[in-house]
């Protein structure tokens, strides 16, 4: 029987800081148990009659569908609210919408621009709020990344991740904080113009010290990936930053993940996996990559046997389900 941690009842996930080191590990344990439960064909009622609001200001494939299926698998319902269909943040303030939605729903998952929006929702709605990506952070993504590493390596503590690309985006920020909490060495490999905030690096380093791991920022790709067990990248231009496209492509072309860079880890064919939060530009199958020719990862790496990107995408659902269950359910009963 899986023991639920009642300290997590009613809790929000606004960024990785919302969870202690042990709660982060526990959340992945719970997600793994829920994955096994689903694999065994069980659709239960852990979230029976629960209603979750999904507020999306930005596009999504994985987060939106994971957030909907996670509650439906366990007997609840998700209501999808886009910026255009509701008054949220347009005709009605976030603060007023938060108080209305909190009276109707058991929880809210938000994806959008400002971190302050997700914080206001959590402060005023009175229900758990989960951050499904803001400009600053993408904490639910880190849970799936950590779960995928656990599946690949067993223990993640002491492993090394090199994130190569836009070093100051939402995914990079959450990876840095999450790795520090999980005892994973983290190297942010990025040009100086895209360095992460010094405050965030200092905070992650302080956490890393207690967990016996290291947080580094490197500009040289070959030096930066040496010894990595996980190579991770993300798009070079995040949602909402489309006007920075030309500048980003010029800065990041030398930071493409290709087989040569995989070889530079020294772990290719032995102890290396490739992760990407997706969506990815890895071939010329999309309008954007055809137009710019800019690929953050080559197709041979993306399609390789050490690429775990589709396990990672599936794990978005199991980890979001773990967040719902831990915050809304008293008895696991499985
Ligand atoms: N990784 C991720 O958040 O994907 P979506 O943008 O499709 O939700
Ligand atoms: N950094 C990317 C992540 C997409 C999941 C973005 O914000 O667009």
Image (cartoon, grey):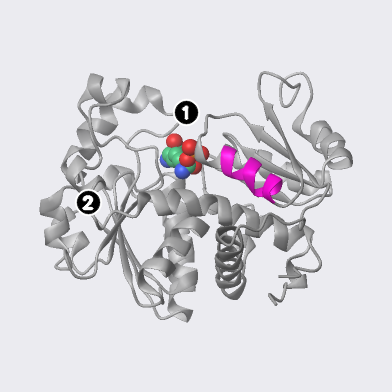
Left-right relation of 39 to 188:
right
Q: Nearer the viewer, residue 60 or 75?
A: 75
**Residue at 87% in and 38% down:** 104
In terms of secondary structure, what is the magenta stretch mainly? helix
Q: Is residue 191 visible?
A: no
Q: Residues within 10 Å of mark 2 (few under 14, many from 20)?
A: few
Can you give x and y, in whole percent of width and height, for residue 25 in the image? 55, 72
User: CA gap, disc 2 to disc 1?
Assistant: 31 Å
- Which is more foreground, mark 2 or mark 1? 2
User: Extreme front residue here?
Assistant: 41
Q: Locate residue 120, reporting x and y percent.
A: 73, 42
Q: Which mark is residue 240?
A: 1
Q: Which picture quadrant has residue 239?
A: top left
How far across and how far down the image is residue 148, in percent?
42, 61
Q: Which residue is mark 2?
A: 304
Closer to us: 37 or 281: 37
Label pair 2/1, CB-CB below 8 angstroms: no
The magenta stretch is 65-73
Q: SS class of the residue under badge 2?
A: loop
Q: How many numbered tags mark residues here?
A: 2
Q: Is residue 58 visible?
A: yes
Please tell me which residue is depicted at 41% across the width and 46% down the height of the picture: 277
């Amino acid at each position: 029987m899986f023991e639920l941690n009642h300290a997590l009842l009613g809790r929000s996930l606004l960024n990785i800081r919302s969870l202690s080191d042990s709660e982060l590990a526990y959340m992945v344990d719970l997600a793994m148990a829920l994955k096994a439960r689903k694999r065994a064909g069980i659709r239960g009622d852990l979230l029976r009659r629960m209603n979750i609001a999904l507020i999306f200001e930005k596009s999504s494939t994985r987060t939106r569908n994971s957030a909907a299926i996670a509650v439906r698998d366990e007997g609840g319902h998700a209501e999808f609210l886009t910026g255009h269909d509701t008054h949220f943040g347009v005709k009605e303030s976030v603060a007023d919408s938060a108080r209305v939605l909190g009276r109707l729903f058991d929880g809210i998952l938000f994806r959008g621009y400002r971190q302050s929006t997700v914080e206001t929702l959590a402060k005023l709605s009175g229900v758990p709020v989960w951050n499904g990506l803001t400009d600053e952070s993408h904490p639910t993504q880190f849970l799936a990344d950590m779960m995928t590493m656990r599946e690949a390596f067993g223990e993640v503590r002491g492993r090394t991740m090199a994130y190569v690309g836009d070093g100051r985006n939402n995914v990079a920020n959450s990876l840095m904080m999450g790795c520090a909490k999980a005892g994973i060495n983290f190297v942010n490999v990025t040009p100086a113009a895209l360095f992460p905030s010094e405050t965030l690096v200092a905070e992650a380093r302080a956490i890393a010290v207690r967990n016996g791991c290291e947080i580094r920022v490197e500009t040289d790709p070959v030096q930066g990936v040496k010894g990595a067990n996980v190579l991770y990248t993300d798009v070079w231009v995040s949602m909402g930053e489309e006007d920075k496209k030309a500048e980003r492509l010029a800065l990041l072309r030398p930071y493409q993940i290709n087989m040569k860079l995989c070889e530079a880890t020294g772990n290719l064919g032995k102890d290396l996996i490739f992760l990407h939060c997706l969506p990815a530009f890895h071939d010329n199958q999309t309008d954007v990559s055809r137009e710019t020719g800019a690929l953050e990862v080559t197709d041979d790496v993306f399609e390789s046997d050490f690429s775990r990107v589709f396990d990672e995408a599936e794990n978005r659902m199991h980890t979001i389900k773990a967040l719902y269950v831990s915050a809304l359910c008293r008895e696991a009963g499985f």
